[in-house]
Image (spheres, coloured by chain):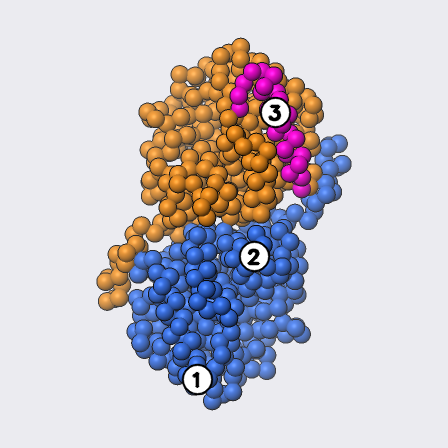
Chain colours: A blue, B orange
Amino acid sequence: MSDLPSRIRINEEGPREGFQIESPSIATSRKIALIDALSDTGLRQIQVVSFVPPKNVPGMADADEVVAGFTPRPGVSYTALWLNERGLERALRSQHKLDLFGSISATMSPAFLRRNQNRSVEEDFAAQRAMLATYRARGLPVRKAVIAAAFGCNFEGAIAPAAVLDVIQRLLDLAEEAQVTLEDLTLADTMAWATPLAVQRLIGLVRERFPDLRLSLHLHDTRGMGIANAWAGLQMGVDSFDGTVAGLGGCPFAAHSGAAGNVCTEDLVFLCHEIGIETGIDLDKLLEVAMLAEDIVGHPLPGSVKGGGSLTRFRAGANRTATTTS
Amino acid sequence: MSDLPSRIRINEEGPREGFQIESPSIATSRKIALIDALSDTGLRQIQVVSFVPPKNVPGMADADEVVAGFTPRPGVSYTALWLNERGLERALRSQHKLDLFGSISATMSPAFLRRNQNRSVEEDFAAQRAMLATYRARGLPVRKAVIAAAFGCNFEGAIAPAAVLDVIQRLLDLAEEAQVTLEDLTLADTMAWATPLAVQRLIGLVRERFPDLRLSLHLHDTRGMGIANAWAGLQMGVDSFDGTVAGLGGCPFAAHSGAAGNVCTEDLVFLCHEIGIETGIDLDKLLEVAMLAEDIVGHPLPGSVKGGGSLTRFRAGANRTATTTS
């Protein structure tokens, strides 16, 4: 209990995760409207687009227009995802609106890497080395590393924590070779294999071996464990989470029709506020944005609190009189 | 970690919770089909109906026919819910097929009690005393007590754990007066106010004061905290949970359109099996029943694993070869 953080930061990835997988026919103006609405909730970091080839991800074909169109709010960091130098070039053209920083990644699943990026593991490490050189040449800071499929993979099965530790070390070695200090590490449960017990175990091992890394969790909710896994992370003192409003998203490469989006941001905010952890986010505003997200995609999204409602209006028996006399 | 039970029992309440709130036009034969399918999953306890007035709960108007129609499987305990002596009379007429035992209850919310059963708190305690006398007269064993709205209430706000302890004591006093030993206590989060922290706190306090009671959790999932709350219970050593297949249910009296059903049985089974806790249930069979439940009610139900799938087929890289060469 005593390891619970007093405050967490949430990196909202709804626009990127969501429009990457939703119908490409959604109007650019509505994507922009979602980003602008999110900007008004108290979120401090929003990943707005991915710069990836339109033929692979048609929903991101208008990424440049989306970035051009949203209204940045002071104090909010807007980020983008890219997977190679061509994507980075596009991001750099919008750098006046984006908070650009380099990150490197590794995937615990060779098969997923092959499907997702058509690379072998060694080709992928070489690509990370090349990206580090590119970031250096561009003068971009490198802030974080991401380990995808850190808990398990639909193609590889369960992933051994020891293997994750080895891959983290390889990324740190690459960073050191490039004279870069990695501060943040995101453990991504890309295909929703994590359980609260696995989260506790892996976080414990990673922290023991790499005590200086700040850990983030990126938890997909395909099997309904998202909030429980986040709670397990909170119990271990993790204070940084990715989330998507209304649970937007999924993974187009997981070859799995049931693949769900990230842990739902407003459900995570609800949990945090109820147990006294600050997020800086206005939950009721965020719930309105969750309903907007549903309206934009045109189908129900998985988040629960947008249906169940926050407890604000029920607190302290506010409606007791009205209901007991009815 | 060390408090995790090695095995839990799950009391499946899907037929009762679900058909209580779903359209009353669902055919009796389909309700029976769901119960028969559940009987074949390894579940050992299934609550099949509630004997309540049809004018209040039209979906239970055919409760007698449902009980008459299902095929009992040896080793499975089939239970029913009733709220008063008239309901008990109906249950007794089907006692050859039902595992009948008495239970007493209290509700932490006077306003909810008034809406739900049109009683004051004192009238409710008096009713419990009368039911204990009835059970004694009928020779029915009394097995458990249930505390409704144990964590919070939409009409009363948050519920103080100390108040819950007092009410448990009152129920134990009633039982003692009736010369009955209560063994099981269910803490019900009727209106989905619980958080994992609140579960840990209340379970800890109850166990400290009443170490001889076996605790069960009845967790509604209206705000998406169900599985996280169950995990918190497991961490506290709780080994008995109510659940509903596919997350069937809701509370017709919660005056809250977003009120969701119980924690989803197959999601809970998935969690348990993944972390090495036995349930005795065949998850893949249960997932088929979850899809049957959706077909019967005619709309999507909230459970996640029925969409995301279990991990059985992905284990040990079973499909690695096929996918890496594709």
Q: Which residue: 62% across, 22% down?
A: B173
Q: Secondary structure at mark 2?
A: loop
Q: Residue furthest bottom?
A: A137
Q: Is residue A3 left or right of residue A131?
A: right
Mark 2 touches mark 3? (CB < 8 Å):
no
Q: Quadrant of residue A173?
A: bottom left
Name the residue beneath numbered marker 1.
Answer: A178
Q: Amino acid at mark 3?
A: Leu
Q: Amino acid at mark 2?
A: Asp
Q: Secondary structure at mark 1?
A: loop
Mark 1 touches mark 2? (CB < 8 Å):
no
Magenta stretch containing residue B161, yes or no? yes
Percent position of residue B272, x then y: 41, 44
- Camera sees residue B70: yes
- Rendered view: A137 above or below B183: below
Region in magenta:
B158-182
Q: Chain of mark 2?
A: A
